[in-house]
Amino acid sequence: MKKDIFTSKLPHLRKQPQPDAVVQSHVETIQGNGFSWIDIQNPDRAEIVKLGQMYNFNELNLDDSISKIQLPKIDNYDDHSFIILHFPPMVLKRGLPRFNQLAIFIGKDFLVTIHYGDLKPLVEMFAMCKENVQHRNELLGKSPGFLLYKIVDILVDDLLHTLRRIVANLDEIEDDVFDENKSTPKKISMLRREITILRRVVHPLRKIVLETSKNTQRFSNPEDDLIIHFDDVIDHIDKVAETLDEAKETMEIYKDTDFMLSTEKANKILGVLTIIFTLTIPPSVIAAIYGMNVNLPGGIQTGSWTFLGPYTTLIFVLIISGIPALFMLFHFYKRGWLID
């Protein structure tokens, strides 16, 4: 017979009221079929110490569970295992950590999850278990090992949603790269940064999940083959890793393409400006000569030419300025510099 499943607070682990400016810790437990699922959001040291006293956890593991800079790992003991997993945040923001850490203690009669409230799928999963009896029976009706598989599975599935968003951004950047009216270097740099962060998270995740599948079978029912279940999760991780590697290569291609197109565009602009500047050299030279305070033919001091009317000198200056400019323009055209 399965034990009745119910939800309750852990009064002995509750924090004292804190100021509103401080993020409140949230500790709850759900009683399953012969084991308890304790979820701790935004933990503080006092709660973690009490938890360690209850289950005789290693002090170093307790310290690691509240640290945000630990590497993924798994430590196995006679009666329990300690696991640290990293998952990427949904949205990368400046000043926030580049991964969300999940610390797990698993034994025959308990599963403890410790995180800082950033793992939305896990938070929603715990809330669903509290509110929905059928959902609670499905997840907590077997063993701690099976529940751990479901937790890892839902968090890895969330990676697929993030992956779809990255692929959509890749398609958008592809269109923008070939649009001369849009600037893409910043978009490319931001997406490359996100892909790099995801790759740093996903590649170690596969190794830890594989070790977890081999070491948590002892915390499940004999009829439940967790290795088969975890193999499906590992396949999803492999798919994410493969897609990220392809996305990284695609981003390199887009970066090179954008660089070449930008260089070509800049060269065209410089070419046009150079031609305009070159065509202005003859008029500038003539204007400089006639602007000097010396006697020149057709100048004011020697008397303006009038054989073509009162503007004879102006016409003469325009002609001798325009002939070299037209000659250079014809030369540029013959060289193909004016052809787009």
Image: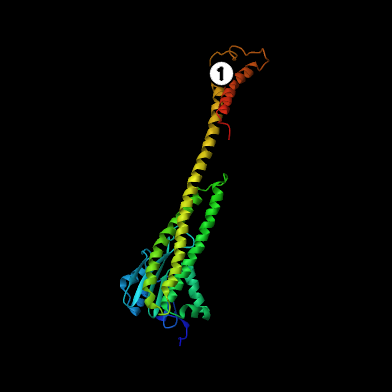
Question: Which quadrant is the C terminus positioned in?
Answer: top right
Q: Most extreme residue toward the bottom, as rendered?
A: 1
**Please, what secondary structure does the residue beneath circle 1 have?**
helix
User: In which quarter of the view is residue 302 placed?
Assistant: top right
Q: Amino acid type of disc 1?
A: Tyr
Q: Residue at x 45, y 68 (%)?
A: 233
Is residue 57 visible in this depiction of the protein? Answer: yes
Query: Where is residue 301 shown, x and y percent of the image?
Result: 58, 13
19 horizontally vs 292: left or right: left
User: In which quarter of the view is residue 333 placed?
Assistant: top right
Q: Is residue 105 above or below residue 161?
A: below
Q: Nearer the viewer, residue 124 or 340?
A: 340
Q: Residue at x 61, y 19 (%)?
A: 319
**10 Å crowding of disc 1: few (<14), some (14-19), many (20+):** some
Q: Nearer the viewer, residue 272 or 226?
A: 226
Query: Where is residue 315 shown, x and y percent of the image?
Result: 64, 19
314 horizontally vs 188: left or right: right
Question: Which quadrant is the N terminus positioned in?
Answer: bottom left
Is residue 45 visible in this depiction of the protein? Answer: no
103 horizontally vs 184: left or right: left
Q: Nearer the viewer, residue 53 or 237?
A: 237
Query: Where is residue 59 shown, x and y percent of the image?
Result: 31, 72
Q: Is residue 154 above or below residue 306?
A: below
Q: Residue at x 49, y 80 (%)?
A: 137
Q: Which residue is mark 1?
A: 290
